[in-house]
Amino acid sequence: MTGETDDPERARRFRDAALPHLDEVYTLARYLLRDSADAEDAVQECYLRALKHFGTFHGGAIRPWLFAILRNVCKTAFARRGFGGAEPAEDAVPVWCETPETPEAQVLRSRDAETIRAMVSALPDAFREAIVLREINGLAYREIAEIVGAPVGTVMSRLARAFDAARRMAGGGGGER
Amino acid sequence: MTCDEATVLLHALLDGELDAGHAREVEAHVANCPRCAVDVRQFRQMRQAMSAAALGFAAPAALRGRIEAAIPAPATLTSILPASVAAAAPSRRVLLKGFALGAALSAAAATGIVFLMQGADQEQQILDDVVSAHLRSLQAGHLTDVPSSDRHTVKPWFNGRLAVAPPVVDLAAQGFTLLGGRLDYIDGKPVAAIVYRRRAHVINLFVAPATGVDRGGARHETVQGFNVRRWAGQGLRFIAISDIGADELEELGTRIEAAVRAGA
């Protein structure tokens, strides 16, 4: 480690700013990588990188910054095993291919967390990422756009497709389209 | 507006991300298109189901420990200086370091709040207890003694268990789901813990009788990575702790303060 990370003041500021978001970073990692051991490794690497580069963080919201670092970690180190691997381009995957049809008409309403988690986890990378950042981590579209490096309009359409795919999985309507 | 356009934009509408002009257009389309109206209803339900379910994951304690170990240990005297102070006034923080009066006092001075020095140790003890109680509550089966989202169930449960009747405020409309209540101990005394959830985050609100040193003004601190908001009023002291953002904890605090003032 360099002398930079040994600065106790900086370490303390990093601790106060970044540690409260550990659960959220871990949550994103769990959904992106779909594996708890990989998620732990990625989050640890994310925090080490974040600490190392904390000098380049110029205030503002720290969550998007942490999420962006985590995303890079997932994309590079874990590409083969999960997130960011060789998946067809999102436009090439018709969302209805994902869907085991069920007779249930009720869309998600009374479903337990496990079922919804599984449903989100089954979404393709780009959709899964968008829906987790938005609906679970609660980021604004603009923040998501910055993290994933895409225009806000793309984020919007990914969310639309994510919800559409999830609804089909839940056996909800919209299938006639 | 066509259905294709509305199909994408209605999500932005539901997420509150649409400007007023587009929002009116989408709403006008949905009002006249039964198919899109079904979409709006179903997607709204899905969002509600997602926000009502705890979809987040808690980082394993071992991971937290490894990360904490990787961060150079802070100088103990400055370890609990609030993050807000550090971010807002770095130069002042450096000055304060020189005084080395003890972290609690430095923090208090930096935020313009002065309390008696002998109170500082006890304050630190209370904060430590609060964090411990919060962490304990997050373990399976420890969160609530009375699990209920109905304040009329939670509030009476404390009758006869505590010397005070803690206010239980329903903030579901503001996105804070009431999970229930619990009896806990802070500084060796029984206190009420009211448990809320926002998205995947648990918030413990501890309520105890006010003591002599309590001041009315709210104080924010970051302790061991958790945000803490403390305030007093109506003869009670309140300590809210969570890993949600300080701004969100502030929102919860001000709403509860207002409700308590109004006689909740």
Image: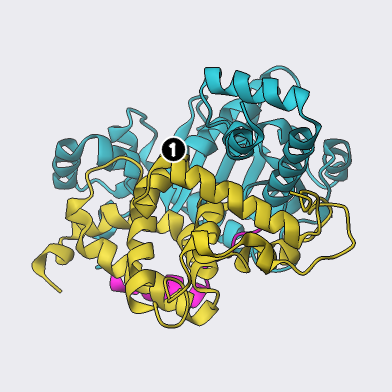
Which corner quadrant holds the N terminus of chain A? bottom left
Is residue A109 shown to the viewer in this render?
yes
Horizontal and vertical percent for residue B219? 45, 34
Q: Which residue is mark 1?
A: B220
Horizontal and vertical percent for residue B73? 27, 67
Magenta-span inclusion, residue B103: no
In the figure, the shade used to draw chain B is: cyan
Start and end of the magenta stretch?
B55-71
Horizontal and vertical percent for residue B180? 78, 48
The numbered mark 1 sits on a residue in which chain?
Answer: B
Please name the residue shown 52% across and 37% down the image.
B248
Q: Secondary structure at mark 1?
A: strand
**Viewer-nearest residue: B87 or A23:** A23
**Viewer-nearest residue: A126 or B196:** A126
Please name the residue shown 61% across and 62% down the image.
A94
In the figure, the shade used to draw chain A is: yellow
**Looking at the image, is B198 positioned above or below residue A20?**
above
Q: Is residue A140 left or right of residue B8?
A: left
- Amino acid at the residue labelled 1: His
Is residue B224 shown to the viewer in this render?
no
Please name the residue shown 28% across and 69% down the image.
A48
- State which quadrant residue B114 falls in: top left
